[in-house]
């Protein structure tokens, strides 16, 4: 088992595909043992997920259809950060775009890697309070309904597997002590 200080040396790096939010990468790298091998992964600008809390203590989630899984999903508002973008600004934009609200207080409460081993992405989790309606501006691919849950209802929906989005489950675990 390599020690944390052992270097995994990058021998070569190729970009297979790019878009504004990520790049498909192919690295050749040398292991501490000296062997050279391949690693295919997605390089991202990160992501943000926001847990908006209304004046009654309920949290806002967005209900939307997930094309790849062919089912509806209740999730906290979230979005990818363009490569080189600012995570705080992205959180403000996603909150407005998906929920139609702005927040008087937006505080980062943690971060997690949604799928390490596949991507270098870190998702930054925020709790938003002091919500003001400003009107939503979803992207053309987003057909969103805002739904409200108490924190206990979110926990019960996770237990019942009706909230099944992994990023929402992870964000809730980080945000719950702040609710």
Image (cartoon, helix red, strand yellow):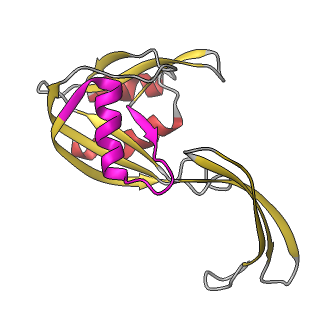
- The reply to whether residue 139 is visible in this rendering is yes
**155 left or right of 142?**
left
Q: Is residue 143 above or below residue 110?
A: above
Q: Is residue 45 above or below residue 38?
A: above
Look at the image and give the residue range highlighted in magenta. 77-102
**112 left or right of 23?**
left
On the image, which quarter does residue 50 sit in? top left
Expressed as whole percent of the image width and height from the top left, the position of residue 90 reads 36, 44
Expressed as whole percent of the image width and height from the top left, the position of residue 102 reads 20, 33
- Determine the residue positioned at 60% across, 48% down: 22
- The reply to whether residue 175 is visible in this rendering is no
Looking at the rendered image, the quarter that the N terminus falls into is: bottom right
- Determine the residue positioned at 87% across, 75% down: 36
Expressed as whole percent of the image width and height from the top left, the position of residue 128 reads 22, 39
Looking at the rendered image, the quarter that the C terminus falls into is: top left
Between 159 and 170, the residue placed more toward the observer is 170
- Determine the residue positioned at 23% across, 50% down: 107
Q: Is residue 66 magenta?
A: no
């Amino acid at each position: 088992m390599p020690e944390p200080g052992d270097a995994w040396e990058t021998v070569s790096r190729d970009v297979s595909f790019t878009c504004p939010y990520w790049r498909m990468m192919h690295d050749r790298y040398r292991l501490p043992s000296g062997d050279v091998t391949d690693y295919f992964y997605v390089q991202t600008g990160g992501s943000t997920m926001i847990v908006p809390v209304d004046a009654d203590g309920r949290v806002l989630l967005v209900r939307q259809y997930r094309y790849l899984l062919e089912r509806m999903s209740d999730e906290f508002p979230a979005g990818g950060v363009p490569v080189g973008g600012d995570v705080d600004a992205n959180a403000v934009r996603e909150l407005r775009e998906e929920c139609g609200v702005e927040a008087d207080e937006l505080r980062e409460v943690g971060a997690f890697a949604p799928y390490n081993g596949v991507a270098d992405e870190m998702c930054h989790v925020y709790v938003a309070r002091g919500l003001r309606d400003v009107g939503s501006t979803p992207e053309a691919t987003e057909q969103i309904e805002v739904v409200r849950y108490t924190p206990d209802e979110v926990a019960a929906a996770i237990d019942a597997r009706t909230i099944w989005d992994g990023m929402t489950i992870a964000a809730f675990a980080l945000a719950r002590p702040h609710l």
